[in-house]
């Protein structure tokens, strides 16, 4: 059960990222645990949306993903999951109604959901399932900046799909951190760096931008990246409690 303070349910303990720190939570939605418990973690609008899915598999995945995000946020805000107010900007970026300086970003690929948490700085996260990418060089040429496409052309054919997806997660994490949605062209900035777990600043036409990106250790079979506003980023992976719904 959740303790209550001033009529609202709160957690007994709270986490909080330090300066330049991003907390990364990963969970694969295998359909274990009580779906009823997950539904109880949602707010009214999410419960209503869950009833509109045509297929039970899709409904269960939506419910468990939203419950996971709320369970993570609850450990920072000191509220029960269903009591957390989440709104969306005009460009679709999720935001907390009462943030207390906290920002978050969510990404999902197949059955994996990733939540990134930061404080007093915008954050974005993206994750992708590793897979062969058809026409990878054509895609890079049409989507990425020239320098990025050239980097992929110079890469060994055996690693190009992995390299493309790694670069894609970096760029998507930056777009999410900025909160620009589709208004920010992917070929208008570069996210080049060494290796899949490197870090650097995004670069625009005038030079380095005031953000830092970094790759992180995603679960096996996935690749991920996070971008944080500021000059540095330190990633901390946190474990999911098995008792969560």
Image (cartoon, rainbow, N blue to C red):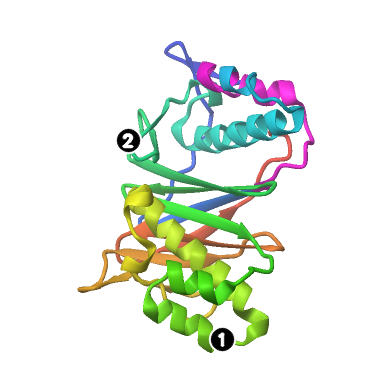
Q: Answer yes or no: do the residues labelled 2 and 1 have beta carbons within 8 Å? A: no
Q: Which disc is residue 102 wearing?
A: none
Q: Quadrant of the N terminus?
A: top right
Helix, strand, or loop for circle 1? loop
**Furthest-top residue in this view:** 7
Mark 2 sits on what residue? 90
Q: Bounds of the magenta span?
A: 27-47
Q: Earlier in the sequence, mark 2 or mark 1?
A: 2
Examine the image and state in which quarter residue 92 appears.
Answer: top left
Q: Quadrant of the C terminus?
A: top right
Question: Marks 2/1: CA distance?
Answer: 38 Å
Above-or-below relation of 174 to 157: above
Q: Residue at x 52, y 32 (%)?
A: 74
Residue 123 rendering spot, x and y as whole percentages: 39, 52
Above-or-below relation of 237 to 111: below
Residue 115 rendering spot, x and y as whole percentages: 53, 46
Q: Residue at x 39, y 81 (%)?
A: 147
Give the class, few, some or many, for how many residues have Cα within 10 Å of label 2's Cα (few <14, many ≥20): few
Examine the image and state in which quarter residue 190 appears.
Answer: bottom left
Side (left or right) of 190 relative to 71: left
Magenta stretch holds residue 197: no
Mark 1 sits on what residue? 155
Helix, strand, or loop for circle 2? loop
Q: Residue at x 53, y 16 (%)?
A: 44
> Is residue 64 shown to the viewer in this render?
yes
């Amino acid at each position: 059960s959740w303790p209550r303070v001033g009529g609202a349910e709160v957690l007994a303990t709270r986490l909080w990222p330090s300066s330049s720190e991003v907390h990364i939570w990963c969970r694969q939605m295998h359909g274990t645990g009580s779906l009823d418990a997950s539904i109880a973690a949602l707010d009214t609008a999410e419960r209503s949306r869950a009833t509109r899915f045509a297929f039970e598999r899709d409904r269960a995945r939506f419910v468990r993903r939203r419950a996971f995000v709320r369970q993570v946020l609850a450990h920072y805000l000191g509220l029960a999951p269903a009591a957390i107010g989440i709104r969306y900007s005009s460009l679709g970026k999720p935001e907390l109604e009462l943030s207390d300086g906290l920002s978050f970003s969510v990404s999902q690929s197949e059955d994996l959901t990733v939540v990134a948490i930061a404080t007093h700085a915008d954050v974005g996260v993206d994750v992708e399932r590793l897979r062969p990418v058809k026409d990878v060089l054509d895609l890079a040429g049409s989507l990425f900046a020239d320098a990025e496409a050239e980097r992929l052309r110079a890469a060994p054919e055996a690693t190009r799909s992995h390299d493309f997806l790694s670069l894609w997660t970096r760029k998507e994490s930056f777009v999410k951190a900025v909160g620009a949605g589709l208004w920010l062209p992917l070929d208008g900035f570069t996210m080049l760096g060494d290796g899949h777990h490197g870090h650097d600043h995004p670069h625009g036409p005038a030079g380095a931008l005031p953000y830092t990106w970094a790759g992180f250790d995603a679960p096996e079979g996935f690749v991920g990246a996070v971008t944080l506003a500021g000059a540095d980023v330190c990633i901390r992976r946190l474990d999911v409690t098995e008792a969560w719904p």
